[in-house]
Image (cartoon, rainbow, N blue to C red):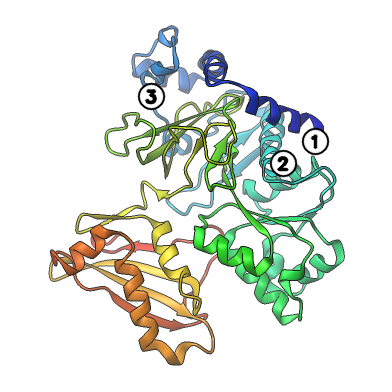
Amino acid sequence: MNYKQIKSELEKLSQLSIKEIKEMQLRKLKERLNYHSQNNEWYKKYLEEHNLDISRIKSLEDLSLIPILEKEHIINNFPFSSVPEDKILRFYQTSGTTGNPKLIPYNRHDIDRSAQLKARGLIFGGVKKGDKGIIIMAYGPWASGLMSQQAGEYIGLTIAGDAKLAEDGEWHPWALKKYSPDYLISQPSFLVRLEEMCNKKGIEISESSMSHLFVCGDMSSKSFKKEFGKRYNSKIIDLYCCSEFGCISAECKSGNLHYWADELIIEIINPKTKERLPCGEIGEVVVTGLYKETPPLIRYNTHDLSLLLDSKCECGKDIPAISQILGRGDSMVSIAGANVYPIQIEDAINKIPELTNIYRFNIVKENYKDKIILEVEVKKNHYKDSQNLKRMVYNNIISIAPELNYVINQSLTASQPEIILLKEGNIPERKGKIKRIFDKRNGNV
């Protein structure tokens, strides 16, 4: 497949009616169920344990009859594959942020198709044939680097700029000048680091050749994209990706994520009851891979939080969409009954330009009440104004949600937050996805 064919697929998807999409999804779903139940002994038994005869699947409403897959099913049933082991060419590994790493098997078909869908995301975001890209992702056992590299090569010259090359601060500024890339793919947090490296080299990042910055791997808030889009003089676009599927969806100008409904089914479920939720209600994203030959990823629970749009997106695109990712069902925290999502915390911090985006949001018990202890780094040359900054951070935190302000200042069922300002560099970072929320109420660190 080439650029022209991938773009043609995207155009055809946008022309399909909802009825046509659902008919295609149902046909492919039946094919995948038959395929995996015939070629994967574990999955066949899993369906039998839930008393599912796949002939009962007559419509997409019957999806709820199919048992949900969790990460433990992948971890505990290695290699979790429906193809012979000699046909498995790669295992992509998760970073292990929220638990034990998963190993996702890929055969040649799945490797190529996943890369093509990521290339589709780049094209959706505005990349044109022949555009040059630089991939600043991890090139180890994770999907991020290799899959992005292959996706970019469907479009044009693609520079492998492994994120670990940033350790000396030399290579990436040099590469931006040498290759003059049109777009970049990285984690949102790397945009901060790249700007720092360029500043040290006397390079004005707003004058770079890049017009599109694709971010994936971590959440990026609206305030982050607005601020760094201005700094880079570029358009920042979210790609919703994971090791299991690659690129699931791409962000439009309205901030929603349009997903590849010809190859994926997306449902939103209640995190507790696991029941399917209607459009407009926040829940966990469950994905079915209609193209997957290797792992039987049918109704796989990502635990990412979002909602299905119940009408045509304001951007005018006819491709089905979900909202931006709000966090994770297993990382959402409840503080004295007030639900707080990670992206809300990030927004509160990013609104204050004197702060870095490095923080630890701790939740503890104090006199039997929930208490927030926020540790956040202050940029160099701003630490002397710490008392004023503390007040700004406090006001932003209690404004995250009306419910949070209520439990802190009205019902008094939560203790007053404690704000700890630290000098830049005092919070140790690590590679991969970064854990920022620490619920220490039950020893869960």
> Within 10 angstroms of label 1, few (less than 14), some, or many (20 or more) residues?
many
Q: Which residue is mark 2?
A: 123
Earlier residue among tags 2 and 3: 3
Mark 2 lies on a secondary structure that is: helix
Q: From the viewer's side, name the closer residue of 221 and 252.
A: 252
The image shows a total of numbered marks equal to 3
Specify whether 41 is left or right of 210: left
Quadrant location of residue 173? bottom right
Alpha carbons under labels 3 and 1: distance apart: 37 Å
Q: Earlier in the sequence, mark 2 or mark 1?
A: 1
Is residue 63 shown left or right of residue 205?
left
**Residue sitting at x 82%, y 49%:** 131
Q: Amino acid at mark 2?
A: Ile
Name the mark on residue 67: 3
Circle nearer the viewer, 2 or 3 = 2
Q: Residue at x 30, y 59 (%)?
A: 401
Could you tell me if the residues under marks 2 and 3 are in contact, i.e. CB atoms within 8 Å? no
Q: In the rendered view, tell whether residue 317 sits above or below residue 33.
A: below
Dot label at residue 3? 1
Residue 253 seen in render:
yes
Instruction: Please tell me whether residue 182 is drawn above or below residue 266 in the rendered image.
Output: below
Residue type at numbered disc 1: Tyr
Question: Could you tell me the amino acid type at mark 3?
Answer: Pro
Is 244 or 283 nearer to us in this picture? 283
Mark 3 or 1, nearer chain start: 1
**400 sits left or right of 217 in the view:** left
Q: Which of the two marks, 3 or 1, is nearer to us in this view?
A: 1
Q: Where does the image place residue 321, in percent across and percent down from the top left?
A: 52, 36
Residue 372: x and y, percent?
28, 69
Instruction: Please say if the residues under marks 2 and 1 sit with CB atoms less than 8 Å apart.
Output: yes
